[in-house]
Amino acid sequence: MKRTFALLVSVLLLSAGAVAAKRPPEAAAATEYADVDDHANERISIAADPFDTEDDTHFFRLDYLKYDLLPVRIIVTNNSDRPINMADVRIQFLSAANDRIPAALPDEIDRRMNNVSNPMDKYHFPIPLPKGKTHNQKIDQDMSDFGFNALVVEPHTTQAGFLLYDVSGLDKPVLRGAAIYVKMIHDAEGKDLFPFTIYFDKLLK
């Protein structure tokens, strides 16, 4: 009986370890990364960490790299004494040819992976259409568990999460000469902070 119980405990511990392993490494402060833009006057730092190999992305439920969807971890560290507002933030991938690629929404990821065009693309609406959940729950789960979902970064804290970029139309290697451009972060008074540009060149050296 004791042996059976011990085996059961071992199996449960191994299972728990396997589940725990299915997560990305803990994010450090933004200034610990090679590719970072540090605004010393504002005491805000933003880093970008691309996960561009299968070993890097093992924790995702789906193989996004297979479909030229590049996961980039965004790390925001607020060392100031006041919160910053990320609710309206725009985080774009800038290619070496100056293509501006917005972060893919879940339904866009779904269409990209299923090679399905959006039937509404041929229409032009004055306002964005509301976005619902996708037909693929694994995408929704990945975006919920690992996506960059921070609306506020409190003083002396770091927030991190992943965004996916459709880089299928870019020359390889896509990171050469590329950058992440971050704008529309608001300070405690609602004023826009100066945009951040995080170049990948340091990482590639």
Image (cartoon, rainbow, N blue to C red):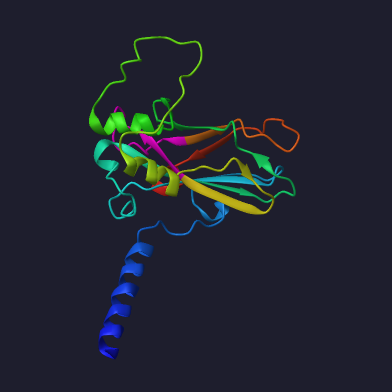
Instruction: Determine whether 67 is above or below 116 in the image.
Output: below
Q: Main secondary structure of the magenta part?
A: loop
Q: Residue furthest front?
A: 1
Image x and y of residue 47, in percent: 52, 46
> Would you identify the image quadrant in which residue 121 lies?
top left
Within the magenta stretch, is there residue 175?
yes
Residue at 38% x, 45% y is 141
Image x and y of residue 197, in percent: 54, 36
Residue at 42% x, 35% y is 178
Residue at 51% x, 15% y is 127
Of residues 7 and 159, the one drawn nearer to the viewer in this rendering: 7
> Would you identify the image quadrant in which residue 117 lies?
top left
Image x and y of residue 111, in percent: 29, 29
Instruction: Determine whether 141 is above or below 13 in the image.
Output: above
Magenta-colored span? 162-179
Within the magenta stretch, is there residue 97?
no
Quadrant in which the N terminus is drawn: bottom left
Image x and y of residue 104, in percent: 40, 32
Count up the numbered dots: 0
Is residue 42 shown left or right of residue 168? right
